Amino acid sequence: MTNFAIILAAGIGSRLYPITQEMPKSLVKVNGREILDYQIQGYIKSGIKEENIFIVTGYKHKMMVEYLQNNYPKVQEIYSPDYLTTNNMYSLYLGLNKINEVGFNNLQYLFINNADCLYDEVLMNEFVNSEFQNAIACDVGSYIEESMKVVVRDDNSLVNIAKTISAEEGYGVSVDLYKYSSQTVSRLYDIVKDFIEVKKDLKQWTEVAFPELFKTEKVLPFDIKGKKWVEVDNNDDLLLADKLFSKFNIKNKKALICDMDGTVYLGNKPIEQAINFIKNNTLKYYFLTNNTSKTPDDYVNKLSSLGIKADEQDILTPLHVLKDYLKEKKYHSVYLLANTKVTEYLKKQLPTIVFEYSPKNNEAVVLTYDTEINYDKMQEMSFLLNNCSVEYIATHHDVFCPTENGPVPDIGSFITLFEQTTHKKPTIILGKPSVTIAGNILKQYETNDIAVVGDRLYTDKKLADNLTCDFICVLSGETTRLDVQKYTGTYPSIIVSNLGEIK
């Protein structure tokens, strides 16, 4: 006698656009793993053989086939070419046809689940190996409007399952995970065949067949007892899954290196949830920015206006790194592309250096985020790069700066412009993701004690990687959830809409 599993994965998942425009929903990653991986691993670790797992595919099934070939080559795929005009009962029908080829007499238990659900492995193991002959895994006592609810008889057996069941009538929420014995599967097959072959009703949910099944078969609710699960229908569900299945624990941290623009505020617009988190949390904060159009005092004052206390030593900016670097190189003449305020700040900090255009004397050229850049400055810098032996220093390489009105060109755009013009690239880039911007923080804390918080994968995330510490990815700035999905580096430790969602 053999146990089998059918995973229903043919649907489009349109409510998860734009991510599902790129891939099937079941291949969307949560905490660095595909939703489908959670399910397959859950079954295998519960004792079901890989070759006894069937997946009914449809939308973008070639991507599913490639994934299975690379990761679970023994899992059997069943393609539904009519996925656009059918629903998941039809997918179940195809799966049951396949099981019937083996013979229901050789079947001990059949497990069925929808491919858009994540389950704790402990939940799946307890359910698969429970003594129940027929069961539906249920979050007893809960009510979710979008989910299937269940109703029980006096003997605790199930009598109904539907989305339309009221909170008063419902016993709990189905987590879309089902277990049926050989006899019950045979009866379920007859019911499903009647819908598909006789009634020609191809657009029903699988669960529509269950109330008829409950009339002759005793099916019990299996209480998951608060274990983790999420049905991922939309982007809010995906964010919930990101948090719920993350292993990140803020209580284990002593300090956060916190990006500002896009994380604490967006241009001039405060991100209130993040600000409240910072104000009401006792962690030590270091505030990180690549933006060299402002001085450290500017950031101290801006944070103060938001109710956040910080000193200049709490501000991590490439300007601090630039000061140390120019001192170390002992330069005397530097051409500086910076706005007036930053220029005056650097002149006070480095009084032995002359910051002006002087082709005969300039030893280096420094490109900051110059909000007063003009054509004369660009001509002068181009001349130095084309004709003089100067070191080319860039304070960072962010392509654009996020604002409440949309992105505007940042230093990375001008680096590209000068490269196209002079064929020269910076010899050194000082800001994040370089660990030098973190100063002496690693001398004060172990890497396990800190985390980087930010909205950019190619700077904030890479800085966390370079520091070998956790990364909290916030979606309040540049990065979208689709960007995270397509990111080829290591996965963020946790993904949240904003810092205020960290618990």
Image (cartoon, rainbow, N blue to C red):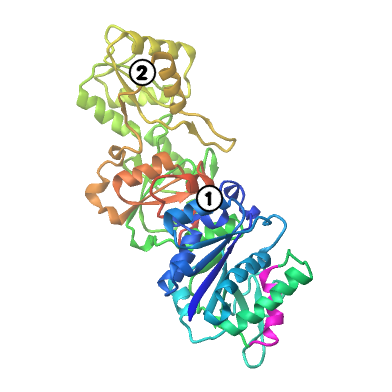
Circle 2 packing at 10 Å, graded few (<14), some (14-19), many (20+), is some
Q: Residue at x 65, y 69 (%)?
A: 93
Circle 1 packing at 10 Å, graded few (<14), some (14-19), many (20+), is some
Where in the figure is residue 287, as x and y percent of width and height? 38, 44
**Left or right: residue 163 compared with residue 361:** right
Q: Which residues are magenta?
A: 205-217
Residue closer to the observer: 451 or 57: 57
Q: Is residue 271 above or below residue 247?
A: above
Residue closer to the observer: 63 or 178: 63
Quadrant of the frame with the C terminus: bottom left
Q: In terms of image quadrants, where is residue 169? A: bottom right
Q: Is residue 175 visible?
A: no
Mark 1 or mark 2: which is in front? 1
Residue that lies at the very extreme toward the right in this rendered image: 199
- Residue pointed to by mark 2: 424
Where in the figure is residue 397, as x and y percent of width and height? 40, 30
Query: Does the magenta stretch mainly form a helix, a strand or a loop?
Result: helix
Where in the figure is residue 186, as x and y percent of width and height? 63, 80
Residue that lies at the very extreme toward the bottom in this rendered image: 155
Q: Secondary structure at mark 2?
A: loop
Marks 1 and 2: CB-CB under 8 Å? no
Where in the figure is residue 177, as x and y percent of width and height? 56, 73
Residue type of the residue flagged with mark 2:
Lys
- Residue pointed to by mark 1: 63
User: How far apart are the alpha carbons under marks 1 and 2?
Assistant: 41 Å
**Left or right: residue 21 compared with residue 429:** right
Q: Is residue 182 magenta?
A: no
**Who comes first in sequence, dot 1 or dot 2?**
1
Disc number for residue 211? none
